Amino acid sequence: MKRSTILWLLLLALLLAAGGYWWYSRQGQVVELVAVTRGEIAHEVADTGYVQAVSEISVYSPQSARVSKVLVKIGDQVTVGQTLVLMENLDLKVQVSEIRSQLAQAEANATAMAAGVANLQAQVQEAEDAVARMAIMYPEGIVAEADYKRAQLQADGLRAALSEQEARLASAQAMIAGLESTLLDLRSKQSELKVTSPLEGVILRLPAEPEQVLMSGALLATVGGLERLEVRVDILSDDLAEIRIGQRALITAPFLGNRTVVGTVSEIYPRAEEKTSALGVIQRRVAVILDIPEPAGLKPGFEVRAAIETVRNSDVLLIPRESIRLGAEGEATVMVVSQGLVEHRLIKVGISDAERIQVLEGLQLDEQIVREASLDLPAGSKVRVQ
């Protein structure tokens, strides 16, 4: 073959390739589109939980104190209100003694002041009676003007002294009321040191030992039975604001296979505890209890995954999570495709689950959008449907 023929063939191949590339570029990039749909979506707070007996209740130290006596042992049957552990708080005992002493002194002072008020009241009454008699005799000249004015001044002085003494008595009585209220609070704290069983059952755990000095919140004992089961989930305190009593929870685990156990939030503990994560991070977590009407193979001690539905919205617009691109300020955009052309559109989103997200504003039902927001498609570019 001649050299010139080869060159012409190469040139023709290049022209065909350029033409093919031009034709392909005019057709646009191939993309996968998804339609905006309407449906139901739920937002979940999910974490690891553990199955336990419904009646299993842990009893904690109500304050920092010393264990003086443990009255039960593991396996003992106990009744509601039965004393389990006696504790002693020496600082609290000293405070009670000091408040009692102050109260006794205040009551003695108030008694003396009350006697003084009664005495002054009698003197005021006597002085006012004397002024009243002189007021009748003074116009007739029976009583001298100086004596009459002296009697008036004496009555005024006694009234002023009475008013001052009554104010002091009122202050003393207010102090007594304050001390009595403080003493009542301290006695209430003292009553907490007698730790009793919250239910009828069996002692399952008993870490408390005599002479131990425990911090407030330390575990003393666990009492429980095995009639019904529940799941305890330790939720991050940051997520607790979304959790409410009565919310639905979906419980899954490898041993359950494809089965999902439905539970309900029945209790939220009032106190957060420090927990160390698997990565060694200290976190503040709050225990949330899920009631399980149908155990479906669950056993105490099993580890499960619990997803609590905090919000469920029906009849809302939905798109895949991967279709949204977030900007530097957190704004959400999608790539809408109309007549083969790309439009970058700002939208407002709501709640989301693992796969979808709710659209509040910016899209209409059945509009077509690019599934993968990671694609680099400039506004106005042409695309082809995969």
Image (cartoon, grey):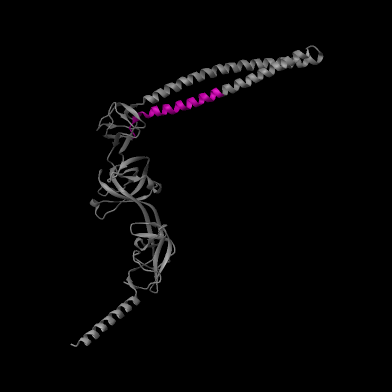
Q: Residue 255: percent from the left, percent from the top?
A: 23, 51
Q: Residue pushed farthest right?
A: 140
Image quarter (top left, top right, bottom left or bottom right) of the N terminus: bottom left
Residue for point 48% across, 19% down: 104
Instruction: Out of 364 and 222, give the one closest to the viewer.
Output: 364
Residue for point 19% across, 88% down: 2
Q: Residue 297: percent from the left, percent from the top?
A: 24, 48
Q: Residue 74: percent from the left, percent from the top?
A: 25, 32
What is the chief secondary structure element of the magenta stretch?
A: helix
* Residue 281 to residue 349: above or below: above
Please give the range of residues in magenta. 171-198
Q: Residue 231: percent from the left, percent from the top?
A: 30, 45
* Residue 192 to residue 333: above or below: above
Residue for point 65% across, 20% down: 160
Q: Quadrant of residue 187?
A: top left
Q: Quadrant of residue 259?
A: bottom left
Instruction: Out of 293 and 313, give the one closest to the viewer.
Output: 313
Instruction: Answer whether residue 174 is magenta in the image.
Output: yes
* Residue 220 to residue 11: above or below: above
Instruction: Answer whether residue 254 is magenta in the image.
Output: no
